[in-house]
Structures are given as C-alpha cells and as structure tokens.
C-alpha cells in the first residue's frame, strides 16, 4: 500500500484594498511628521499610507515594521470604520487604584516633612516603611510610592525640592 504525502498549499488570502481620501491622507502624513504619540499609532498610519499607495498587506507590513496580521487588521478596520478606529487602540481599563486620596495625601504630607531621626533624607524604601509604620496603609510597595512621587513631582531625596515649614 502506497502512502500519499499531502502537499501543503499556501492559502492565498484575498488582497485588501485601502483607498484613502485626500483629507485622510494629509491627516496621516501630518500625524507622521509631528512625531508625538505612540509608536504603534505611527506604524498603523504608515501601513495605511503604504497600502493606499498600492502595496500589499505583507509588503506594507514589512516596510512599516509590523506583522502581516497587524497590517491586514488595520486595513480591515479602516474599511469598516475609518481612520480613527484603524490607527487608535481602544481605551484600556487599567488596574484599580492602590492608594485612595486620603492615603496619598497623608504620604505626600509625610514626605514633605522632616525625615525620621537617623536619616538625612527620605528614600523610596524609607517612605514605604514609614507609611506602614505610621499606619497610613497596611502595605505598600516601593514602586507604588515611586509612581505617587512622580505623579506629584516630588523628589524628597533632593533637599531643595522638599517643602518645609518655617519655625
């Protein structure tokens, strides 16, 4: 009995055609020339422009530095819902807040005061330990403290940036 080997045929995908209006084309070019925003938004805009010039999804993907599936998805989203939907991601939910407003305010106030005895300045690890010791929070990580300080533009390890009460 002879065994037959099945030949694998590459599945040909139907080409996706992108036709941008002059207004959309100029908006995408302006977006690419400004240089502020997310890299993935730029790449998606570049894919749309390349496909509008007649490149196939694999060619546009290669030129824009994205995967072929990304290029195809961007083109399909454009054809279904337009430019905005094609190049921008949906909002992401993010995680729950780890500190409430009262806890944040208490930690900021603590950081703006004098460092504990034996310490010249506040450090992130010292802030985390003191917040637990003073029962502001049950537990807190150093990365949470770092994000809190960054959000409030505080650098307590730099003497000049700490607000102190005059005695």
Image (cartoon, rainbow, N blue to C red):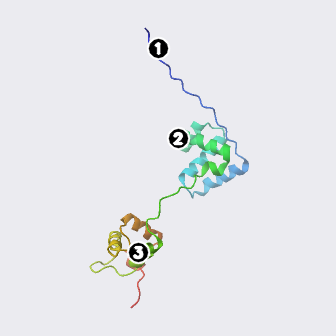
- Tell me the quadrant of the picture where the C terminus can be found: bottom left
Q: CA distance from mark 2 to mark 1?
A: 34 Å
Look at the picture and state if 15 lies above or below 105: above
User: Taking the image as drawn, is residue 50 in sight?
Assistant: no
User: Taking the image as drawn, is residue 54 in sight?
Assistant: yes
Residue at the image point whose x is 44% and y is 9% from the top = 2
Reading the image, the residue beneath label 2 is: 67
Secondary structure type for disc 3: helix
Q: List x then y, in percent, for residue 23.
A: 72, 51
Looking at marks 2 and 1 on the same chain, the residue that comes earlier in the sequence is marked by 1
Q: Residue furthest bottom?
A: 167
Q: Residue furthest left?
A: 118
Q: Which image quadrant for residue 127?
A: bottom left
Look at the picture and state if 68 lies above or below 131: above
Reading the image, the residue beneath label 3 is: 107
Secondary structure type for disc 2: loop
- Tell me the quadrant of the picture where the N terminus can be found: top left
The local crowd at label 3, few if under 14, some if 14 to 19, many if 20 or more residues have their Cα within 10 Å, is many
Instruction: Please state the total of marks drawn on the protein image.
Output: 3
Residue at the image point whose x is 42% and y is 79% from the top = 109
Looking at marks 3 and 2 on the same chain, the residue that comes earlier in the sequence is marked by 2
Could you tell whether 109 is left or right of 116 in the image?
A: right
Q: CA distance from mark 3 to mark 1?
A: 73 Å
Secondary structure type for disc 1: loop
| In-front residue for pair 96/147 | 96
Reading the image, the residue beneath label 1 is: 4
Residue at the image point whose x is 40% and y is 74% from the top = 107
Look at the picture and state if 139 lies above or below 46: below
């Amino acid at each position: 009995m002879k065994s037959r080997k099945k030949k694998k045929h590459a599945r040909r995908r139907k080409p996706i055609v992108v036709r941008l209006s002059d207004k959309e084309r100029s908006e995408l070019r302006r977006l690419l020339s400004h240089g502020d925003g997310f890299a993935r938004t730029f790449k998606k805009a570049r894919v749309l422009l390349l496909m509008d010039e007649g490149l196939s999804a694999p060619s546009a993907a290669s030129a824009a530095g994205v995967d072929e599936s990304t290029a195809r998805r961007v083109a399909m989203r454009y054809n279904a819902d337009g430019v905005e939907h094609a190049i921008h991601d949906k909002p992401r939910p993010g995680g729950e807040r780890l500190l409430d407003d009262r806890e944040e305010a208490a930690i900021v106030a603590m950081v703006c005061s004098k460092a504990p005895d034996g310490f010249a300045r506040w450090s992130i690890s010292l802030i985390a330990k003191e917040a637990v010791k003073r029962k502001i929070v049950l537990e807190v990580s150093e990365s949470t403290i770092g994000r809190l300080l960054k959000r409030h533009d505080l650098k307590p390890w730099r003497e000049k940036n700490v607000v102190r009460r005059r005695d």
